[in-house]
Amino acid sequence: MTGQRFKQIAKDGVLINNPTFRLVLGTCPTLAISSSAFNSLGMGLAVTFILICSNAIISSLRKVIPNEVRIPAFILIIATFVTIVRMFLYKYIPDLYSSLGVFLPLIVVNCIILGRAESFASKNPVLESACDGLFTGIGFTLAITLMGVFREVLGAGTLFGVKLWDFSIGYFSNTAGAFLVYGLFIAGFNALYEKFEQARKTRNYVEIMQAKSMAGASEAATSESKEV
Amino acid sequence: MTVKQFLQSKIMKCILVLLCIALVSGGLLAILNDLWAVSDEEIVNRAIKSLCGDGITLQKTITTEKVQYRNGEVNEVYLLSDGNYLVKATGYHGFHEGNVSVYVLAKFNNGTFENIEKVSIASYSSSQTLMSKFNEDALAKFANDTNTVVSGASSSTNTVITGASYSSKAVGNGVASAKYYITHDLKKEAV
């Protein structure tokens, strides 16, 4: 895998195709878990681990799994890693295990994981697929943690469980608040993305025009010297 | 289709691939399940830590035999190092007739029962979908509910969490069963 390809996968996973804010995938855990920053980070890391492992395994088996049974096979592989994560959390981080509750086993049907397996891992080599899993996971983790921080600070006056102040707006902790915050974050992220994209296009356009004018100047100089 | 044709067919390949994945996954999960198994003792210690904080330990197991009442049952009873009791009880008649198991911390003063200090959820059947409503504040209501009916651990309590009334009933039945056991069936010599 070239450095250019690696950069492209990283940019795709975290920014251009950010699963939460650009593709609006994995909405269910995003809305339900993001009331606390610690839970959000835990969910993000769990999904990232499952994405890396499932992408790598699915990619390595992509020539063996018949097309007709690819979805059941993907689900089997994803469910295995979800169960591993469940067992690990129950043993070593029981608080997080009970906080994530039913949303932990529901990772099996998370659209982000099945989506990346179907659209990327089943068509690309192992290393690239694992990188795609890593960066898509980072994109999801950053998004859900950012929302978790916002909702926890405003909704409970705490950050990662540490009390900041007595002021809190309960609305941000409940479901309606989750929808509002999610909408605001999607709008903000897309506005920023469009701005950067516009700036990038303008920069490219200026560079092309400069290159053209330089090429035109050098052509004119060549023809002048020929005439002389 | 002959047997040989079937064995060479795509259907056979699909079955074999899925079977192989399932077998490898199953083997891996069996090994990890054995490695990361959480013992019953560890589960009780976690409950003690979450209800009493650090420093309190399990002193004696009073019983692990089920004591059944009309609307609930007591599953396990433990004496703690500070003289209080931890009771694991299960309340019946939750949503879709599901059950909810609770840990109940009973405060004792010089061997006399004073009150229910804290309640936490131990486990619940899958039909109880609104258990996230039972946070620490909600469970404190069950502990402080003086109206909890203890007679024969029958129908439980006036405490209801909005939107989860059936699950509330099961939690209440669990707490009532624990309370009934403590006040009636906990052997004097154990106290």
Image (cartoon, coloured by chain):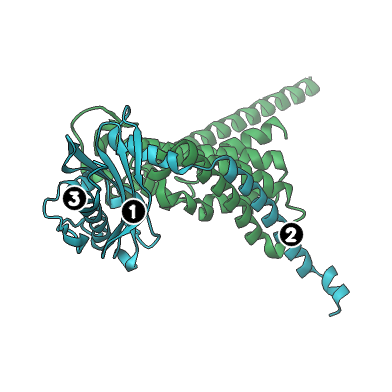
Chain colours: A green, B cyan
Is residue B15 something that shows in the picture? yes
Q: Which chain is mark 1 on?
A: B
For this rendering, which residue is in front, B147 or B13?
A: B147
Left or right of B141? Residue B99 is right
Point out the residue furthest to the left here: B147
Which residue is depicted at the point 11% across and 51% down? B146
SS class, disc 1: strand
Dot 2, crowdedness within 10 Å: few (<14), some or many (≥20)?
Answer: some
Q: Which mark is residue B17?
A: 2
Left or right of A34? Residue B71 is left
In this view, the mark in front (2 or 3): 3
Q: Which residue is mark 3?
A: B183
- Report the quarter where the N terminus of chain A lies: top right
Q: Which residue is mark 1?
A: B101
Give the residue type at disc 3.
Answer: Thr
Q: Which chain is mark 2 on?
A: B
Distance Cα–Cα, label 3 vs label 1 = 19 Å
For this rendering, which residue is in front, B24 or A39?
A: B24
Which residue is depicted at the point 27% across and 44% down? A173
SS class, disc 3: helix
Q: Which chain is mark 3 on?
A: B
Left or right of A198? Residue A216 is right
Task: Please report whichever mark, 2 or 3, sits nearer to the chain's N-terminal start.
Answer: 2
Q: Quadrant of residue A201?
A: top right
